[in-house]
Image (cartoon, rainbow, N blue to C red):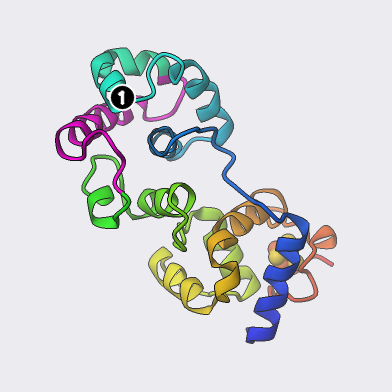
């Protein structure tokens, strides 16, 4: 895909949604960290239902650590893999309290050292809580990047690197959310809504439904 097309794609996505953000509900970097850890293989809606009950009771590393694994599990058991997520979060809270003054670190290495936090989660935190131009490639972004021709790649890391290298600087902070939302609501896995897609004429997907 040539640079002019790429710029036009992001110009249109920005015009349609000038201030995109995550659909996870959060008020602090720590709440976002909890929500993102819970969101693995779960829907944002399901996570929001759980955190709406959890955060009024416990929304700091100390408070969640004090709940203990079983106490935390009670709040999140509607979410898949809740037992291991509770275990990871309690361990992460402990590290935050003991090593980071109860604050969420804004550095990749420190984030990825937290239990339950991998590269993708770290990218979401760095981007959404700290405004860094990272690209958390999830299943939606992976699909959209490959279909459109924006950044074809066989692995999420390859797609992440290509996107970061080729997206014009002015779009880099928000690109992550535009691509996720486009994949979630328009360029869907089984039935992409090509006829109503605002970048259909720029997309290089050979099986476009037009
Ligand atoms: S035209 Fe179709 S395949 Fe291309 S981005 Fe839009 S929805 Fe996805």
Tell me residue 161's x, y (percent). Answer: 42, 72
Give the residue at x 48% y 54%: 138
Q: Residue furthest left?
A: 98
Tell me residue 20's x, y (percent). Answer: 64, 51
**Residue 159 in view, yes or no:** yes
Which residues are drawn in magenta? 76-105
Which image quadrant is residue 167 in? bottom right
Judged left or right of residue 57, residue 169 is: right
- Please name whichever residue, 90 or 191, is drawn nearer the observer in this view of the structure: 90
Give the residue at x 24% y 34%: 92
Judged left or right of residue 156, residue 174 is: right
In magenta segment, residue 66? no
Say above or below: 42 vs 123.
above
Tell me residue 30's x, y (percent). Answer: 38, 35
Q: Does the beta carbon of the residue at mark 1 sit less than 8 Å from ligand 1?
A: no
**Residue 189 in view, yes or no:** no
Give the residue at x 50% y 29%: 47
Say above or below: 23 vs 75.
below
- Write down the residue under mark 1: 83
In magenta segment, residue 96? yes
């Amino acid at each position: 895909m040539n640079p002019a097309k790429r710029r036009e794609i992001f110009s249109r996505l920005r015009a349609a949604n000038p201030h995109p953000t995550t659909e996870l509900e959060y008020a602090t970097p720590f709440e976002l960290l909890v929500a993102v850890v819970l969101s693995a293989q779960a829907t944002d809606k399901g996570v929001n239902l759980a955190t709406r009950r959890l955060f009024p009771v416990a929304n700091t590393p100390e408070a969640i650590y004090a709940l203990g694994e079983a106490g935390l599990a009670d709040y999140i058991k509607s979410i898949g893999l809740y037992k291991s997520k509770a275990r990871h979060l309690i361990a992460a809270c402990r590290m935050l309290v003991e090593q980071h003054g109860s604050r969420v670190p804004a550095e990749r290495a420190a984030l990825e050292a937290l239990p339950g936090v991998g590269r993708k989660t770290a990218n979401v935190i760095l981007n959404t809580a700290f405004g860094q131009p990272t690209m958390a490639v999830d299943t939606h972004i992976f699909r959209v990047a490959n279909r459109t021709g924006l950044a074809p790649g066989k692995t999420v890391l390859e797609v992440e690197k290509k996107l970061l290298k080729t997206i014009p600087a002015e779009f880099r902070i928000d690109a992550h959310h535009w691509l996720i939302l486009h994949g979630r609501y328009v360029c869907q896995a089984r039935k992409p809504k090509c006829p109503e897609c605002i970048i259909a004429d720029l997309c290089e997907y050979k099986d476009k439904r037009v």
